[in-house]
Image (cartoon, rainbow, N blue to C red):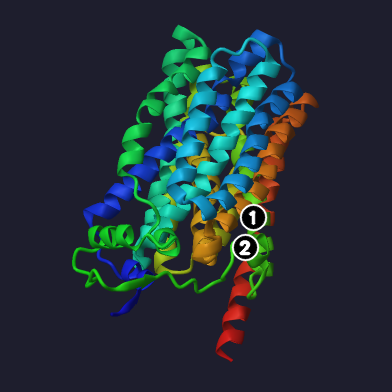
Amino acid sequence: MRTLDVHPIIDNARFTPFHWMVMALCGLLLIFDGYDLFIYGVVLPVIMKEWGLTPLQAGALGSYALFGMMFGALAFGSLADRIGRKKGIAICFALFSGATILNGFASSPSEFGIYRFIAGLGCGGLMPNAVALMNEYAPKRVRSTLVAIMFSGYSLGGMLSAGVGIFMLPRFGWESMFFAAAVPLLLLPVILYYLPESIGFLVRQGRTDEARKLLKRLDPDCDVQADDALQAADRKGGGSSVLELFRNGLAIRTLALWLAFFCCLLMVYALSSWLPKLMANAGYSLGSSLSFLLALNFGGMAGAILGGWLGDRYNLVKVKVAFFIAAALSISLLGVNSPMPVLYLLIFIAGATTIGTQILLYAGAAQLYGLSVRSTGLGWASGIGRNGAIVGPLLGGALMGINLPLQLNFIAFAIPGAIAALAMAVHLASGRRQAHLATA
């Protein structure tokens, strides 16, 4: 009887239709997640007018979902390391879809905020688990690319939200945007039937027969016999405690990653929540303002795929440093009076280097941590980052409330990009130092 480690089999597997299926299902989950997250920025101008909200009140209301996401990422990330990725994803998906539907029935800002908080719990928990699952099935040579392509579903969801808003808001009102979440909820049984559980998790749970079947589907050429013992050797840690994120030379990189998550999500949510309103105040129509949101998310999708491709061929952390510098520059220039083609290009680049880099941060975090703490590591990075997501809409509301010039608003949104670039540079230096100590 042989003892086989499942990780080398997964790492070296050729790309098969099974990989496509896992990537497509995780991407579909994130499309729905992205729709739910960006929906608030789409309906914001309408509900501000209907409920007579001040910019600061609107920013606070937008943060309800983000508070939920923070707690959801922390709770469901750690929980999934114990109950499995698939169960964690199912709970989160049902939670945010159901709460989003209820949002359409909200009759006051406080009721609206409660439903957004509950939806945020599900959205925050789904992201780290979907990324962890995709990372655990992707062959090593294309891991960053596949995670980035899968996560670009998040940007597609944002584009879908803006596109549905352009069509439905003038015709059916803001409530219809939330009722549309009933469609993905109907697909939950299909997703649960086809979505596989993590092979490493199955091995750790002693469910080796299920793990063998999935290995054969993953790589039909692999030589796994019925009497072979399987193991999932965790090369980067042995427990599922949060303290494991700071052991084995990971402390500086973990803290740098958390700071980068914070800054990146601040930029993403400041832009996604306030870009339509800022552009409307600058004299653009509601339709044009929502088209800017489309350009932002289209850029996010393109940036994630390009960044993942570059990360697999060069160094993923270096790519993130460059993207953050580009984010700071492009967002700063948004407040300058530019021709429409230049404005769309700047918004596209801003989306590529904020939304796109957020996706690269998830891919990098998944590669940094071992199997036993992967969802925990992703969940905590995402949860800490959600504080930035909370600050983003509040910052936008505060800036709008004091009537700053348009250019200064965007410069304020750009500063976190420079801080995140510095954090990733520290992350890179720490990783090199740790590698040098390991080989010394």
Q: Amino acid at mark 2?
A: Met
Q: Which residue type does callout 1 highlight? A: Ala
Which residue is denoted by mark 2 in the rendering?
424
- Of the 4 image quadrants, the one containing the C terminus is bottom right
> Can I make out residue 108 in this image?
yes
- Relative to residue 184, is residue 423 drawn left or right? right
| Residue at the (45%, 39%) spot, across then down | 90
Query: Residue at the location (49% across, 22% down)?
Result: 288
Task: Looking at the image, tell me whether mark 1 or mark 2 is earlier in sequence order.
Answer: 1
Packing grade of label 1 (10 A; few <14, some 14-19, many >=20) is: many
As drawn, the label of residue 150 is none
Q: Foreground: 59 or 331?
A: 59
Task: Report x, y in % for residue 67.
Answer: 68, 36
Q: Secondary structure at mark 2?
A: helix
Q: Is residue 196 above or below residue 174?
A: below
Residue 399 in the image: x percent, y percent?
76, 31
> Dots 1 and 2: beta carbons under 8 Å?
yes
Q: Residue furthest bottom?
A: 440
Quick check: 95 left or right of 418? left
Residue closest to the eye, 170 or 39:
39
Residue 201: image quadrant is bottom left
Residue 27, given in percent of the width and then of the height, sits at: 38, 43
